[in-house]
Image (spheres, grey):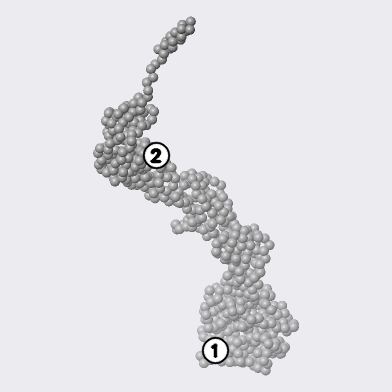
Amino acid sequence: MRRQLLAFFLLIGLISSCNKEEVIPRTNPRFSVTMVQDISEGGAEFRAQMIDYGSDEILEYGFVYSEGENPKIGYGDFVSEQGRPNEFFTLKAITGLIKGKTYFVAAYLKTNAGIIYSEPSSFLAQGSEGFVLNRIELKQPVYFGDTILVFGEKLSSNPAYYDVTVNGIPALVSNLSNTGFKIKIPSWFETERVDDEHVVLTINLKVVGKTLDLRESVRFKEPEFIPQPVQEVFYKEKVVVKGNYLLSDEVKVIMKNDTGGGWELPLVSFEENEVGFLAEINNYIYKNGSLFLRIRGKDYPMEDVFKMKGSELEPGQLIRGSSREYFVVKGSNFIEQYQSNEFSTNIPGINAYSEYSSENEVVMYFNGEIVTRELKLFANNFGQKSQNFAEIHFTDPYLNYLKMPSEFRDYRFIQESGVTVGDIGYFFLERNVYRIDPKTRGVSIVAKAPESVFHLAGGFSYAAINGKIYLGAVSSSESQGSFWEFDPKTNGLRRLADIPSKAKKPKLVYATQTHLYYEGGYTQGAGGYTWDPGVFKYSFASNSWEKLNREFDNDDYLILFRTFRYNGSIYTIRDETQSIYPVIRKFNESTEDWEFVRDLGYYERVTTANELFVIGDWVYSFNHQSWAAFNMKTFENKIWERSYESSSFAMNYSFQANGKIYAYDGNNYLVEIDPAYFSD
């Protein structure tokens, strides 16, 4: 029974084995070590022999070579053919070989299962044929990152052998084949512009030692600017321009003027879609410049991008000081540039200048120009007046008040003068009569003497109590004079009876309601000075002169004395031979003579002004060294040393109005002198 079972199982196994296919073992192809059988300047020829084709289908065969000792596809150059090779197969490498370099070459076979390499052999290259460029293609307009297609022949398949730059910047090479490759334009490079539409692409191709330079004039993508609301910014705040295709090797933000010049603004950032810059501009640039963006060498006008906001002052500022000193004004968003902030005042014609500044402070200077005692100062940057103001209070004894006509600056041997009528000044220069109104800061010529008159006030000018001005004129020569009346109400000039005195410049002239008195004086001629001590009286009613029975008793000084009115009476300050001090005398209209009042002690004897100025109970006089005053009630006197600047004032041109004294400074300005600011 046991034998029967064993025979049964053997039979079953035999039947099963007859149903299975026979298994054939897999084998790899085998081939010989590569032989390098021809090396020349045109390349190298490689040869190998098949020993066993193996069991897998052969899809491709060839040779791979590189400078590395273990050449592999992807890490070296290669030559190949498709399909199954003959027993002996030969291929020639005509590219990728540099003369004098040692290369390693291996045969390879590609099957479905992979790539099989032979053992490598080495050889010394003698060179190879270079690549041949057929054409390049690129889509225009061009932009950074775009692709250039290169078509050619005899191209190396080894990416390590490609060195490509575009406008000097390394470029990525991809998609290598035996007919071409791709170049990716770098993300930025320096642009060379041909015109507003075209730029130059300089492409340098270096493949296995062969170099080719190409210069292509191409259209480049234009920037696209995205409209935005106008950005209102303070000085130095950031402004942003948005758009597309804004990349460039260099971006500049320029405020151009009409002549083609301009000012560059600080650049903060530039990206593909945004350019940021600082509004670091002053008033001049803002008024005279237009915004441009320079991208890839081309300037693009930008309109309605930003608007400057003005500066603001801290409220409640009260600053006192001299008009020739510096003032520090506090606020916000000032222009941080030297002399760049603009200010305005509440007084037309008064200018203020900025010196040094920071974001929150400006050093101001009025440069000694025209000012008024008190003014309000406003910031006025970028045409926007500040809401707040700083109150400026000048403490100078005198201030430049208005600009005088240029003819007053000319030197004249014959010195003329000015007088006060009400709160108006009248100056006389040659034949002209000038009216000066401190309230309006106006100067105008209101009358002119006949041509026979050379100097209308060459002898004297005097404002009488009757409201008219009397003038001793000098005509064709200093020895000839005439006597004139000017009426400020009508601006009329009328010649009166000639003065009988030999003197053209009186030592003393004054008037009552009915008469004008002319005392002493001198005439300067070729032989020197001629003195006339006579005292003469002129009648307004009869237009006639008479000589009084007394003489002016002081001929020691050529400088003339002046009179003033106080409480309805006429006074003078004189030197007298019997006193070492100047004395005050009062005119007695009944006796028509001067009565002694008192001496003034240590006091200035004469004044260079044409008048003595009465303000309240104080009488002010001026000379070259000092300003002086005495009080008619207490007879107290004061003397102030004059500054260097004021010592040159032409005080003969002076008058008073509203408690202040106005005088010509001898150069450019009429100055306002305020005794309230004289330092004790």
Checking the image for residue 633, the label placed there is none
On the question of residue 344 being in view, the answer is: no
Q: Quadrant of the C terminus?
A: bottom right
Q: Left of 272 or right of it: where is 75?
A: left
Q: Left of 436 or right of it: where is 600?
A: right
**Which residue is denoted by mark 2 in the rendering?**
174
> Of marks 1 and 2, which one's residue comes earlier in the chain?
2
Specify the amino acid type for callout 2: Ser
Q: Secondary structure at mark 1?
A: strand
Residue at (39% x, 39% y) in the render: 174
| Mark 1 to mark 2 CA distance (whole Å) | 108 Å
Residue at (61% x, 71% y) in the render: 325
Q: Residue 7 occupies which quadrant of the picture?
A: top left
Circle 2 packing at 10 Å, graded few (<14), some (14-19), many (20+), is some
On the question of residue 362 being in view, the answer is: yes
Decide which of 176, 92 is in the foreground and name it.
Answer: 92
Residue 382, given in percent of the width and then of the height, sits at 57, 57
Residue 490, given in percent of the width and then of the height, sits at 61, 74
Residue 553, given in percent of the width and then of the height, sits at 64, 93
Q: Above or below — where is 86 with respect to 410?
A: above
Q: Residue 507 occupies which quadrant of the picture?
A: bottom right
Circle 1 packing at 10 Å, graded few (<14), some (14-19), many (20+), is some
Decide which of 451, 144 is in the foreground and name it.
Answer: 144
Decide which of 220, 33 is in the foreground and name it.
Answer: 33
Specify the amino acid type for callout 1: Gln
**Which residue is denoted by mark 1 in the rendering?**
524
Q: Above or below — where is 507 with respect to 12?
A: below
Q: Left of 598 or right of it: where is 557?
A: left
Residue at (67% x, 77% y) in the render: 678
Residue at (51% x, 55% y) in the render: 266
Q: Secondary structure at mark 2?
A: strand
Q: Above or below — where is 590 with respect to 362?
A: below
